[in-house]
């Protein structure tokens, strides 16, 4: 199963269930993606913890007017089909109310930051 898609669904379902925080299996890629979401204001905090001798990530969710900040997610690149964007192909998501997350040679960036850094890369997902 695709681990990034699984992480996104856990975040979305945790928000819809009204959970304060959710736990995810640890990986460096997930941590980098969650740090990007934290920087862009979609989650409150992320920390690495150990539960039952296994490393996990604890993610604290954000709510606005009792609605979760992460309402919908859309996976762009899949394991069967990778999608790459050049710097000029990166556009705003939902007229600026969403975020496109890219894996670039310089690291994991949001769409606005990738344009500022003038890099393109693999479009991982959109969130709004």
Image (spheres, rainbow, N blue to C red):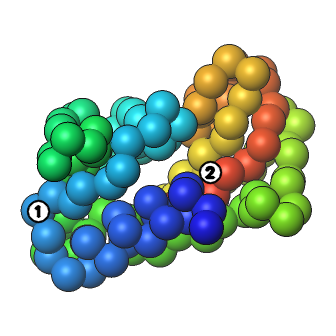
Residue 20 tag number: 1
Q: Nearer the viewer, residue 31 or 126?
A: 31
Residue 126's spot in the image, x, y percent?
A: 60, 60
**Where, by quadrant of the figure, is residue 76 drawn?**
bottom right
Q: CA distance from mark 1 to mark 2?
A: 24 Å
Taking the image as shown, residue 62 lies to the left or right of residue 6, namely left
Taking the image as shown, residue 113 lies to the left or right of residue 88, namely left
Taking the image as shown, residue 39 lies to the left or right of residue 45, namely right
Residue 100 tag number: 2
Residue 71 visible in the current orientation:
yes
Q: Residues within 10 Å of mark 1 (few under 14, many from 20)?
A: few
Q: Nearer the viewer, residue 2 or 11?
A: 2
Mark closer to the chain start, 1 or 2: 1
Q: Residues within 10 Å of mark 2 (few under 14, many from 20)?
A: many
Q: Nearer the viewer, residue 4 or 19?
A: 4
User: Which quarter of the rendered picture does the N terminus lie within?
Assistant: bottom right
């Amino acid at each position: 199963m695709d681990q990034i898609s699984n992480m996104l669904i856990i975040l979305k379902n945790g928000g819809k269930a009204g959970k304060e925080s959710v736990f995810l299996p640890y990986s460096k890629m997930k941590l980098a993606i969650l740090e990007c979401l934290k920087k862009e204001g979609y989650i409150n905090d992320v920390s690495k913890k150990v539960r039952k001798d296994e490393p996990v990530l604890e993610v604290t969710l954000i709510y606005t007017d009792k609605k979760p900040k992460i309402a919908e997610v859309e996976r762009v690149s899949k394991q069967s089909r990778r999608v790459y964007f050049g710097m000029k192909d990166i556009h705003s998501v939902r007229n600026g109310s969403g975020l496109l997350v890219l894996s670039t040679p310089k690291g994991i960036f949001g769409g606005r930051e990738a344009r500022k850094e003038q890099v393109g890369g693999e479009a991982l997902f959109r969130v709004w």
